[in-house]
Image: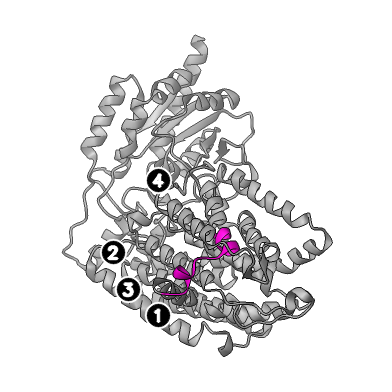
Amino acid sequence: MRSAGISDVTLGIDSLWKIPLQYRNDIQVMRGVAVVLVVIFHLGIPAFSNGFLGVDVFFVISGFLMALLFKPGEIGSFYRRRASRLLPAYFATLLAVVGYSSFFVLPSEHAQVVEQGLFGSALASNVGFWMQNSYFSKAEFTPMLHFWSLGVELQFYLLVPLLFWAHHKSRFLLPALLLASLAAAIVIVAISPKTGFFMMPFRIWQFLIGGAIAYYLTDRGAVRFKHPILGLGGMLLLGGIIFIYPIDGAATDPVLGHPGWAAFLATLATGSILIFGLPASLADRGLGLGLVRLGDWSYSIYLAHFPIIVFVLYQPFSGTILTPETSQQYLTISLLIVVCTAILYRFFDSQRRWRGSFKGIFALITVGIAASLASNAVVLSGYDPAERTVFSANSDRSHYRCGKLIRIMQPGASTCEVTKGLNNAAPSLLLVGDSHADSLKMAAAAAAKRQGHRLLITVSNAPLVGAPNSEALKEIVDRLNISGVLVHYAQENTDKALDSQFAQSITEEVPTIWLLPIPRYNESVPRQIWHSMQDKHADLPTPQNLSDIDAFATDLAAAGIRYVDLRPALCAPACKIMNANGTPLYFDAHHLTLTGARRAEPLIEDAIASLMSMSANRETSD
């Protein structure tokens, strides 16, 4: 990535831009280290579970370089140079992923690739993935997940001229923006970690720290304060964060979550290297020169590696698999990364081979969108209606929890309403649980609405099991005048919920009925249906937890807690995994599709009627 690194550009507006940019091996060393960290993290090697911080390193370096590469008064030239530098390899990768997917993955996964291709073509991959799930979730098939960081960078580039203008107007505007972005990132992690992770406004502080270092603490990018031992300290600090710091990407805690305290320390570590440099023994010889070479190729490596891992390990209806199981898989992935990186670097990752223009940019975007849409139609045309029905399982589910925006628009909300159009004075019910309750919420909402009741659910991204907050639930019940509570957990979470104080305390507070866990299977149900369609002799699976459900029902009865068994909706007379027309009742091994949840709707409606009867009796006795 030498051409983005600062080696061959001489700028001239005032004295600052008349100084030629100096190529720095230590920056390329950091790039090499960062891309190695990201690749190893994506391979699922446990010791590198914090390797995603390599992207934070890239953000700081990118801000550093943009402060040096942007020439005031030449905005068009700046964007053409950035486009010709980044977009050819970017769109080559996008088209290769869409093209490969068209031939070698099933339509259920290819439809997700098409969506990623559309967001990627609009240079907004981070927005697309933010609308799905956490970066750390593997539920979706996401061979272009790594494009999220490029979306953040490209959106930052759009702000660069405005940032220079703001700096020209007042020296205090950019420091204020930096602090505001950092403060917002800390706050948003406590509300919606994935928003802080994916969205550019909550990352801009990292770019601005890099830019401030370039502008104030270097001589046109060259080291002004030559204390390489301090730069080495920054490298050691980065290593300590990678291997020791306990980061939890899903935590709503600025200390443990991301981007939080660890991102701040990684940013400072990178900044110290940019300010003070690295010892010559590390940057200019031996292993350092190898890392410099990796740094030169880092953009191509970054683009190529993730789709290769995902495609080599692809299994139908299994989401994104990233950890190889055999040495042969590791070898295959490694060889393909080398080959594809070489192709990208040789034919696309070179500013000299591409002369960007705004017409060219729009042409690339148009081709990306057209290829994505066309491939979807072509792929589906190769399958009969019965097969397409199986592929529909992935889309046969509602939005996650309370939707994409509520945690941003209503950050203090502890619940959201699933039913719509009812008077606020209507009796209110509360659905409590984990992702299994989430998959039932639309069926429960329909059942509640038919009886004239509102249904609310808790909006926390984390399940309430482990340490249910009974006091918080009591506050919700009292504040919203909840008439009854439905509780539904996955089998593996039931004992935790029942053993905690939550079970008894909420039952004492308000009429409560537990919906027993649903039957679950050993592997993806759509995958098993697909295999049975390919192999007519294959047996359909049987559920694995029926005896566990019976045991939990016994435990609830012993605790005096009322429950409703959902199995008659799915297992009458025998347990089923699809409707008569072949529509899957599950979208994975244990979560119901909307179709599957509708089968349980009459039972949920009976449970709601019982809840309201219990509530009326309690009011009478009071």
Question: Is 274 contained in the magenta span?
Answer: yes
Kindly identify which residue carries mark 4. Answer: 597
Left or right of 15: which side holds 232? Answer: left
Question: Label 3 is placed on what type of residue?
Answer: Ser
Q: Are marks 1 and 3 in contact (CB under 8 Å)?
A: no
Query: Magenta span covers which residues?
Result: 270-285
Question: Label 2 is placed on what type of residue?
Answer: Pro
Instruction: Looking at this view, name the residue that lies furthest to the left.
Output: 537
Instruction: Looking at this view, name the residue that lies furthest to the bottom.
Output: 353
Question: Is 70 contained in the magenta span?
Answer: no
Report the disc number at residue 445: none
Q: CA distance from mark 1 to mark 3?
A: 10 Å
Report the disc number at residue 324: 2
Secondary structure that dominates the magenta span: helix
Q: Residues within 10 Å of mark 2 (few under 14, many from 20)?
A: some
Q: Nearer the viewer, residue 158 or 399?
A: 158
Horizontal and vertical percent position of residue 334? 32, 73
Horizontal and vertical percent position of residue 34? 47, 65
Question: Label 4 is placed on what type of residue?
Answer: Ala
Q: Secondary structure at mark 2?
A: loop
Q: Secondary structure at mark 4?
A: helix
Name which residue lies at 67% across and 74% down: 69
Q: Residues within 10 Å of mark 1 (few under 14, many from 20)?
A: some
Say if residue 135 shows up in the picture: no
Q: Residues within 10 Å of mark 3 (few under 14, many from 20)?
A: some
Q: Secondary structure at mark 1?
A: helix
